[in-house]
Image (cartoon, rainbow, N blue to C red):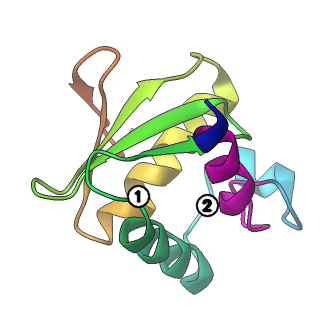
Amino acid sequence: MKRLMMLVTVMCCGCRWCGADFDRVKYMSGEWVPRSTDSLFAHNMINMINDQGVWAVPMSNQVYQFDHRNKVMTLIEGPDTEVARDIFRKNAIVFGQCGYQVVDGRTKGEVNVSE
């Protein structure tokens, strides 16, 4: 658990996922379009976390596991709240731009970003 807490601390970068400096009304309205810094953050995350490593997202209390060989990012833990679903959808969009499929491993279902 100590290692995971260190990971969370390192990953808090001030991006939209961490909650710093963005318009919450626009963020929650579904008008979200990834900025270049969001894409850069996703690429850096992919390069930083080992295969089968996990990423904890403090804003939504979610934990994702990376499978680099199959280019899949799986939600393995987290609540089913409006904020968590929104973060999941946004992760699917931005990590999808990096060639990764984002799936909800809690239900074994894939996200449908067109919803």
- Mark 2 or 1: in front is 1
Seen at 11% across and 57% down, the residue is 69
Lateral position of residue 18 relative to residue 55, left or right:
right
Callout 1: SS: helix
* Place of residue 114 in the rendered image (x, y in percent of width and height, measured from the top left): 34, 46
Seen at 72% across and 67% down, the residue is 15
- Give the amino acid at mark 1: Ile
Q: Is residue 5 magenta?
A: yes
Callout 2: SS: loop
Magenta span of residues: 4-18
Q: CA distance from mark 2 to mark 1?
A: 10 Å
The crowding category of the residue bearing disc 1, from other C-alpha atoms within 10 Å (few below 14, some 14 to 19, many at least 20), is many
Which residue does the numbered mark 2 point to in the structure image? 32
Residue 93 marker: 1
* Place of residue 4 in the rendered image (x, y in percent of width and height, measured from the top left): 59, 40
* Location of residue 84 (image quadrant): top right
Question: 107 or 43: which is nearer to us?
Answer: 43
Q: Residue furthest front?
A: 2
Seen at 55% across and 74% down, the residue is 41
Decide if residue 29 is in sight here.
Answer: no
- Give the amino acid at mark 2: Trp
* Location of residue 93 (image quadrant): bottom left
Q: Residue furthest left?
A: 70
Check the picture and name the quadrant holding the C terminus.
Answer: top left
Q: Is residue 14 above or below residue 66?
A: below
Label 2 close to label 1 by CB (< 8 Å)? yes
The crowding category of the residue bearing disc 2, from other C-alpha atoms within 10 Å (few below 14, some 14 to 19, many at least 20), is few
